[in-house]
Structures are given as C-alpha cells and as structure tokens.
Image (cartoon, coloured by chain):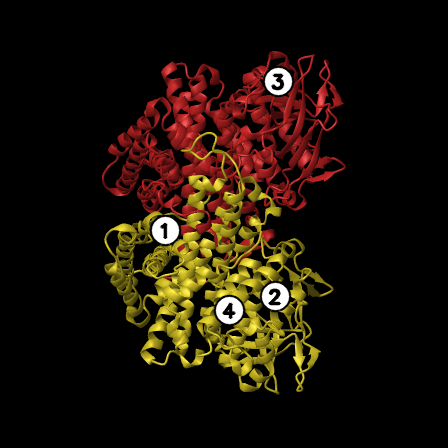
Chain colours: A red, B yellow
C-alpha cells in the first residue's frame, strides 16, 4: 500500500473553502506565499510517503519494547526521526524566536494529517512535543524557556503529557501525584502516571515530561493542580545533558493498535529525587492545560481524518484492482473490478465525502485558531476565537468518529482479505480506534459543545455561523446539483436550528436532559457544517470550471461529492433532531439492576 | 469478565414474541416441553459460561499454531471440546436417526449465540460441522451418510467448508479446484483453498472437508461446480480410521481476531492421491451449498448478536464499576460510576436495544425455518419458508452490523482501558469484525434481499409481513409508551413501504439503481422488523404485568427498550428512504480516476 498525500484537495480547501488568503495577507505570514505553501505541502507529502509510510507495518509488527528499563523503538524509527528533525519538520509552524519556521498553523495541521496516514504511531511523538512547546511558550518563566524550548522546537528533545492516573482519567481533578517545594525553587515530584504516550524511547536524547501534580496545601479537585516540567536528563548550565532524573518506565501497555508508540506507565520519584520545575503558577495547572487543549483536540481530530484518508486510499486501491463477480444490472460476461459494484461505490463515496467534510471542518478550525491570535483587527480575533472554540469539538468528535467508521468500511471493502493482517487495513482500524477516546472522549466533546460552547458569548458564535450557512444557502440556485444540495443542506440546517433552540431552552431547566442528546447533536452539528463546507467547495468549483486550464475532472468531483454528502449522508443526520430533543426520561427509566442481563 | 447467558430474555422471546409454542405443539417436538426447553437453555448458559468463556482470552493470546504440518490449538481447547461432545451439545437439534437429540433448531441457535459470546473462535468449529451435517443429510447417498454422519453429528469428527480460492471469493463460480472421476466411483481432487476455518486441529480425530471442485467437462461458472466429501483420514469398512488422505495445511492466516480458530490454506492432492466422494449430483454443488446457506447465514448473524451481547455485558459491568467524574446535571459532590452519565446510558441502551432487536429477528427466522420443514399444514410450510428466506439477509446483515457497532461502542464505554488488550473488550471488536464479511458479505446480503427475496412468490412474503406489522400497529393505543412506539414505528413502516414500492418499480428498469440503495434498504427493513418485534414484546409485557407474580422489573424493561429503539434509533433509519430511492446516478458520475487522490 502506497500512501499519497491528498495535495490537490488540501490546496483546494485552502484556496477556495477556508480562505487561507486572509491569513497569509498578514505581515506575520508575509513569507508564506502561495508558491511556498504549495512547495511545503508537496515536500510534506513526499516525506511522509517515502520515509514514514514504509515503517507503518513493520512498526506495528515489532512494536516498541521495554528492554532493561528503556524503550526500544522498531527498526528504522530512529533514522526516520533524525530525518524528520533534520528536515525542520518539527519546527514548521513554531515561533522563529526559538528556531521555528513561523509558517501558518494550518500547514502543520495538514502535515499532522499526513503523518498520521503514513504512520500514526510515529506521529504521536511530535504531536505530544508540540503540546509541550505551547505550554512552555505560554506559561514558563524565561529561564525555563531559554533552557528547554530551542531543543524542543527543533525536535532534538521530545515532550510528553502526564495527566492520567488509574483513578483520574477524564476526571483529571482526582489525581494524586504529589509535588513538594524545595529551597532552590524547584519541586520534588512523586507519583505514578499511566497512558504516557512516548514516555520513553531511543529516537532522541532527552524527554521532557509535563506532569500534573498536587502541592501539599493545594485545594481539592481541578483547582489544586499544578503543572511541572520534569526532564528525563537534567540540563547543565552550558546546555549539555546532566544527571539522570529520578523517574522510570514501569511497563508498556499491550494495546489494540499504534504498537510502535510506547504507551508507558511512569514512576516519578521512587527514590525521592525526582526534580521538576513549575510551569505557570501554583494551582493553575489546569488553565495551562487548557492552553494546549484546543490544539491537542484539533490534532487528534486530524489523526482521525488521517486514518480516514488512509482507509479510503487502501479501499480504493483494492477496489480498482480486485476483480470479482458481475455487478448487478450488467451482463453476465462483465466480470469487473469490485469498484464497479454499486454497493462498493457507495462505500467508497461515503468514505471520501465524509473524510473531506471532516477535513474541511478541521482546516477551517485551524485557520480560525491562527486568526484568533494573529488577526490585526480585535473584532476579527474575537470572532475567530469563538469560531475555533465552537469547531474544536466538531473537529475532534466527528473527525475521529469517521476515522473509525471509515476504517471499518475499508476492511469491509477488502472482504476476507481485510481480516488478514498482512493486507494492512486491519491495522488502520486498530490504530484509529483510540482516536475517539483520548484527548477527551467524544462523549466529553459533545458535552463540551452543549455545556460550554453553545453558551459562550451569549451564543453569538453559533448564531453567526448558522446565519452564514443560511446566507450561503440563499445564494444557491434552486435547480441542478447545487439546487439538490440546497434542499438537503437546508433540511439539515432547519433540524440543527430546532435542536439548538430546544437545547438552549432546556439548559436552564435540566442539564441532564441536554447531556442525553449531546452525542447525536454533535453529529448533526458536525455534518451540517461539513456539508456546508463541501457545498462551498462545490459552488467555487462551478465558478472555477469557467476559467481556462481548469482541472475539470477534479472540479467536477467537488460537485459530486458535495451532493453525495447532502443527498445520501445528511438525511439520517437531520433525522436526529427528534432523538436529540426527547430528553433524559427513557435513559434513566430503568435501574442499574434492570439493565443487567 | 464473566459472561452470563441472557436466559430470561431468550425465554421471553420464545414465549411471547416468536411464538415457539406453534413449534412445540408439533408431534415431532412433543418431547420439547417448556420445562425441558428451559432446562436446556440453563445448562447451555452454564456450559458456555463455565467451560468456554475462561478460554476466550488465553485462546486469543496463544492462537492456534501450525507445528510440523498439523494445527495445535490453544491450551484447554482439546479438553473443552471433549466436554462439549460428551455433553451431547453438538447433537442438540440433529436428527435422532443419526444420534441427534431432535430438539427444535431454535435451541441450537440460542446455543450458537451463547457459544459466540463465550468464545467465538471455539464456536466456529461446531458451526462449520453443522453445515456439513446438513449437506450430507440432504444430498449424500445412504452409504456416505451411514459412514460419516453419526460421528459428525456427535462431534467425534468435525467438518469444514472449502469454497474460497484466491480468485474466487464472493464469486464462487470462478473456482478452479479440479475433480477427476475414478473407476471405483470416487474422485481425485486437486487444488488449493484459502480461508478454511478449522481446516485442521487437534481437538478431534478426523476432519471431514466439504470441497467445491470442477470436473474436467464441467460447464463454466456456478453451473459447473460439484461438492465432494474429502476426509482427512480415510474410513475403513469397520468404521475405524484408515490411511491419511493426500491433503495438507499449507499455512495459517494472521488475522485481526478469532486467533484461536485456525484459518487454513489447504492443499488437496499435492501427490495426486487426494480421494473425495461426490455429494449430490455432478455439477449440482451450488444447489447443495444453498441447502446450507440459509442456516449458515443465520448462524453468522447469531455470531454477530453473540458479539453484541458480550460487548454489552462488558460495557455494562465496566460502567457500573468505574467511578469517574460528576454527571452533568448533578451536584459537584456526586462523583458517580460512569453508568450515571447520560451519554454512557445512551451507549448502553443503544447496545442493549439493538442487540435485542437483532436477536428477535434471528429467533423468528430460526422458528420459521423449523416450521417451514415441519409444520403439518402445507400453506403453513410455504408461508414460513418465505418468511425465513426474507428474514435471512436481515439476520445476517443487521445481526453482524450491530455486532461490530456495539463492540466498538463497548470499547468507547471503557475509555482508555478499552484500548488495552488485557481488558478483553478490544478482542470483542477484533473477533466481531469478520462477521459482516464471511458467509456472504453484508453487501451481498443486501443484494440478496432486493434482487431475490423481494421478488420471491410475487412479493407475497414481504407484503404479508408489512400487513402483519400494520395490523399490530393498529392494535396499539395512541398514548403512553405504546402510543409513542406506534408513532415512530409507523413512520418507519411508511418509509419502508415507500422504499419498497420504489424498488419494485425500479427493478424492471435498472437493477444497478436498485443495487445502489440495497445496503441502506437492508438497514431500514431490519430495523423496522426489529422495532416491531420489540414492540410485540412490549405489548405482551403490558399484558403480563397484570398477572400475579409477574417479574415486574424485567417486564418494564421490555417496554423501555422497545420505546428507546423506536424513539431514538428508528428515526435515522426511516430517513434512509430518501437515500435509498435516489438511484445510481451519483455513484457512477465520477470515473475511477476522478475518485483517485
């Protein structure tokens, strides 16, 4: 299986759907010319396809292993990581002050999707490092920044996030790891953490752990959590590696997928000598985490989309190649590739349309995050921050849901061969399955949407987005492909408005009733926005078709996929309006014992 | 994880939904008294939970292995299989003439579901053997029957199905394995088969392979296929094992799941000495296969349901145990098991309601199959055969779809722990994933429904079923729980009628357009029938509630689950009417190249 980055479609999204030109018009991104952006995407596609993709299956087979207390990664990972760092990929959108290349964030998002398609387990390492960069940049004192950021930005050192403990998963506030103040201003850390992605490895010389812990006099719950930087090796004043810190890998998890990504149980301070440095203020660790959270959630959404894209490419390649049977409705002699079977086409178009819809949401989300920080106009920043906040649970929830759904469809397209590990598509399903879980389960994303995001700024952001969709719908013709899209997308918007009105009214009465419909609401919301963005692309494609030298074949596909999404995938989503608004009565009508076998 | 067979619900289905009393009223089943049926179900639950379930995870970890040309099964499988045979389980519903216990087929269906929940990989061995029994019983000459059936019925020997070759999967007619007539009436078989479930093992002393092959003068395609019995060990006239036949295991597949079930590549006649015996007539192999197909498809549907049931039990146990976070809409101090979170309840009820709906379809299907053979009245047999034929793609397609969907939901309920193999729920997803593929992919089930079953007997069977649902709907009150069900189930029936009318009209014009909507149509059809059967149960529960000593808690759950299914799960299914009836235009609007990346 050869992975091929969807460059043409990504470029189209940037140019015609997301409107990246607003971003690149800013002084800050004056260097990000269209030519440079295209060149970076092209090189990213090449690097992921040529360097990372070949290690996907071998990485899965070998897995990372704990040998004498340190983690050994699969063959080739060390060399690939070196190429990754040497190519400057880790620093793509990082701050130039610390050696970054200062490109728009959306480019590293596109790259994150590509890395995931090519080799998700590999990509988790830099993904976690990116979060650590953000935390240090936003909250650490200058001395810590100067000491740690340059090597973290370049990728010479990697970063981790240490949140989870056995009793504290989604409920981070329940964590028990301790931090004690020392005379020199540092802290001693003691405790055990689980699910630590790339908690140790042999691809880089140092690992910087970001650890959530609790001071002796800290308030209970999330208000008493502080964030610490805990390096594997201490750093001397000249920047060289110093003594080994008192932390170790206890064990690695045996997981369904991403076998090459070492998921560690970490022990800090077994011998009472684990040194950490405070990031931000004491007891403000949760707000430091929130800094990273939106980026991290978007990145996980992009992982889902990367899995969906890979799944599509695997299914497409197999369907074109595999000759089997006579398609219903054709002549007995017409033995054909399964690509010609209507039902296989349905699966392929479902995968492609949903992947593109999710990608459009995620890219718009990334662009809005960037503008929220960098737009010159204050109102612009406010609007984009609200949009980014609103879209984040969609990117994460819908992106990872379709990651799993499409990986499962891709297995189905392969028939019996899909169940055989050598084919590689079973791995896509195994790898993808974690994405709806980590970085806030999709249930939590749905609660974030109905509980927090809908209420933000008095609901201004979703109202504005709905108005924008409505205005767009009114601009569409009433016949032809765009007319068909107008009908089904219009139905979805009506359903979304009704469901939202119900939620906004119910919020004041019964939050549990709101929570009861949160997951189908997230689905309806995501698919309406996704369908809208595909339709924006379709309308733009119609306009582009009139230009000379237009890539007609590609532009036509924009129209067909947008219509397929609207006509085939949106109606069941619109029908979720009823289920969303039925409240929590039935869900709690039965006692736990009544739900037993 | 302890598996516990859903005895109470199965019994309720038999008594109040399927109407098994029609069956047990027959002379043939005069021994199948209510007490005996209940006792058999109870013992089956005990055997599967106590003997098979403990080997589920170890079987997955060890897998079956090819050692010096023979397959070694995981520790404990041999002993468990011996207990299975000694307990008479293999012969539960087999013909007493060959040592069977002659119980109704529906009981072995219930047992098949239980085996799958407890240990799917184990259960595949008897499942394949059951198919071989049917083929021999229906088509073999008496001498073959006498020689092979008793030990196949008891389980002393096991059976396999050898259909697939690399180029011939769903398209069986493309197979190339050869059969040459010999002077003594036997045949020499030569060729290679793939995906042979339990093709070799160490749990029983002989393996009887049913092999599809082609005579030198056979017509092309499916009309030139013959079925042969090819034993691993020849049988002497005194019934003892004779010489080793010329067949061998080439290799085992590395699969996503069911690791304990050896999936073999088989070579027949490498040395030109592989002896086989014709079953049925030359070139009539496909019709012999069709004899088994309905039973086999129902059995695979039951596997899906068994996976769904196990997934539910795993998720339920975890959700009651795992304390995490404060449910939205409750006080901050109310840290609670995740069972109390509305979104987790939604997942659990979705799993339970869909599992019960699928089980009701499959049980009705099994009962109809039995009555189709054994009812005294000819009209009755005809009606039940038609019903069984119509329901088979539903049982297989919907049963296995929800098997995978619910296994994935169960992983989600577990959060991060769901991704860890030790938890056991990841295995449920891995195992379940084959069920929508084998024994006719679910795409093929959908084509079978729209292409064959809708047209059978001029459409009399689906029309009668729709009328039956309509009559039932009219019998429901218009308010309360049953009134709510009436509304949503009524909408589903309207959608199903409209979609069916469109398909019946379109069949004459454009079969590819019909095929384009086949999969969502199968979903709509299945969920309407499933919702109807749950509603039948709910109505019966209301009646039962009036009797003294009624199990009120359980009966109430019948009502809540039926209403949840109707109110929460049916609306998106009903909304498939539009997508089903849009034809094949969009699916074929793009060329293969346009669908490339």
Instruction: Bin the neighbour count of mark 3 within 10 Å (Cα to Cα): few under 14, some 14-19, many 20 and up.
Output: many
Instruction: Bin the neighbour count of mark 2 within 10 Å (Cα to Cα): few under 14, some 14-19, many 20 and up.
Output: many
What's the residue at 44%, 58% (across, down)? B399
For residue B431, side relative to residue B245 (left or right): left
Label placed on residue B107: none
Instruction: Bin the neighbour count of mark 4 within 10 Å (Cα to Cα): few under 14, some 14-19, many 20 and up.
Output: few
Which residue is identified by label 4? B39
Q: Nearer the viewer, residue B369 or B349?
A: B349
Where is residue B343? Give x, y as percent: 43, 40
What's the residue at 57%, 86% (across, down)? B143
Determine contact: label 1, label 3, CB under 8 Å: no
Which residue is identified by label 2? B198
Q: Are marks 4 and 1 on the same chain?
A: yes
- The chain letter under disc 1 is B
- The mark nearer the N terminus, 4 or 1, is 4
Q: Nearer the viewer, mark 1 or mark 3?
A: 1
Figure quadrant of residue A153: top right
Figure quadrant of residue B475: bottom left
Q: Spatial distance from mark 4 to mark 1, Cα to Cα?
A: 28 Å
Where is residue A94? Give x, y as percent: 55, 21
Q: Spatial distance from mark 2 to mark 1, Cα to Cα?
A: 41 Å
Q: Nearer the viewer, mark 4 or mark 2?
A: 4
Q: Nearer the viewer, residue A353 or B154?
A: B154
Label placed on residue B560: 1
Which residue is identified by label 3? A278
For the question of whether residue B226 can be seen, the reply is: no
Instruction: Bin the neighbour count of mark 1 within 10 Å (Cα to Cα): few under 14, some 14-19, many 20 and up.
Output: many
- The chain letter under disc 2 is B
Q: Nearer the viewer, mark 4 or mark 1?
A: 4
Q: Spatial distance from mark 4 to mark 3, Cα to Cα?
A: 66 Å
- The mark nearer the N terminus, 4 or 2, is 4
């Amino acid at each position: 299986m050869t992975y091929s980055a969807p460059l043409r479609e990504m470029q189209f999204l940037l140019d015609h759907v997301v409107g990246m030109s607003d971003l690149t018009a800013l002084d800050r991104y004056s260097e990000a010319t269209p030519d440079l952006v295209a060149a970076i995407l092209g090189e990213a596609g090449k690097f992921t396809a040529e360097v990372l993709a070949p290690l996907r299956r071998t990485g899965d087979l070998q897995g990372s292993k704990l040998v004498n207390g340190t983690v050994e990664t699969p063959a080739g990972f060390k060399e690939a990581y070196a190429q990754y760092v040497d190519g400057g990929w880790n620093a793509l959108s990082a701050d130039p002050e610390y050696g970054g290349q200062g490109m728009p964030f959306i480019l590293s998002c596109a790259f994150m999707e590509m890395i995931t398609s090519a080799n998700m387990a590999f990509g988790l390492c830099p993904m976690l490092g990116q979060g650590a960069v953000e935390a240090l940049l936003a909250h650490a004192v200058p001395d810590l920044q100067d000491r740690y950021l340059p090597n973290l930005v370049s990728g010479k050192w990697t970063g981790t996030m240490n949140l989870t403990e056995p009793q504290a998963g989604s409920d981070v506030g329940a964590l028990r790891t301790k931090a004690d103040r020392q005379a020199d201003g540092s802290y001693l850390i003691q405790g055990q953490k689980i699910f630590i992605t790339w908690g140790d490895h042999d691809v880089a010389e140092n690992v910087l752990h970001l650890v959530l812990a609790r001071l002796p006099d800290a308030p209970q719950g999330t208000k008493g959590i502080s964030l610490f930087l805990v390096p594997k090796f201490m750093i001397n004043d000249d920047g060289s590696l110093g003594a080994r810190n008192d932390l170790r890998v206890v064990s690695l998890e045996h997981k369904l997928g991403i076998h090459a990504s070492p998921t560690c149980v970490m022990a800090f301070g077994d011998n009472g000598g684990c040194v950490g440095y405070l990031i931000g203020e004491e007891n403000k660790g949760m707000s430091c985490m929130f800094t990273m959270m939106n980026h991290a959630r978007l990145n996980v959404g992009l992982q889902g989309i990367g899995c969906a894209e890979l799944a599509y490419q695997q299914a497409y390649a197999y369907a074109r190649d595999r000759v089997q049977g006579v398609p219903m409705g054709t002549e007995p002699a017409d033995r054909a590739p399964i690509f010609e079977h209507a039902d296989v086409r349905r699966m392929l178009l479902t995968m492609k349309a949903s992947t593109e819809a999710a990608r459009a949401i995620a890219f718009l989300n990334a662009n809005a995050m960037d503008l929220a920080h960098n737009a010159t106009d204050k109102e612009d920043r406010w609007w984009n921050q609200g949009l980014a906040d609103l879209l984040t649970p969609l990117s994460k929830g819908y992106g990872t849901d379709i990651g799993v759904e499409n990986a499962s469809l891709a297995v189905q397209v392969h028939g019996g061969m899909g169940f055989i590990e050598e084919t590689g598509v079973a791995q896509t399903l195994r790898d993808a399955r974690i994405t709806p879980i980590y970085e806030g389960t999709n249930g939590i994303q749905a609660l974030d949407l109905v509980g927090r995001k809908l209420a933000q700024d008095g609901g201004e952001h979703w109202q504005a987005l709905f108005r924008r969709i409505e205005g767009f719908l009114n601009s569409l013709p009433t016949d032809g492909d765009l007319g068909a899209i107008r009908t089904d997308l219009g139905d979805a918007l009506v359903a979304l408005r009704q469901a939202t009105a119900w939620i906004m009214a119910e919020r004041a009465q019964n939050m549990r009733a709101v929570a009861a419909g949160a997951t189908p609401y997230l689905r309806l919301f995501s698919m309406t926005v996704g369908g809208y963005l595909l339709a924006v692309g379709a309308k733009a494609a119609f306009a582009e078709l009139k230009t000379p030298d237009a890539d007609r074949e590609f532009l036509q596909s924009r129209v067909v996929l947008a219509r397929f999404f609207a006509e085939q995938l949106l109606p069941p989503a619109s029908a979720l309006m009823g289920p969303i608004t039925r409240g929590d009565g039935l869900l709690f009508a039965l006692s736990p014992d009544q739900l037993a076998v």
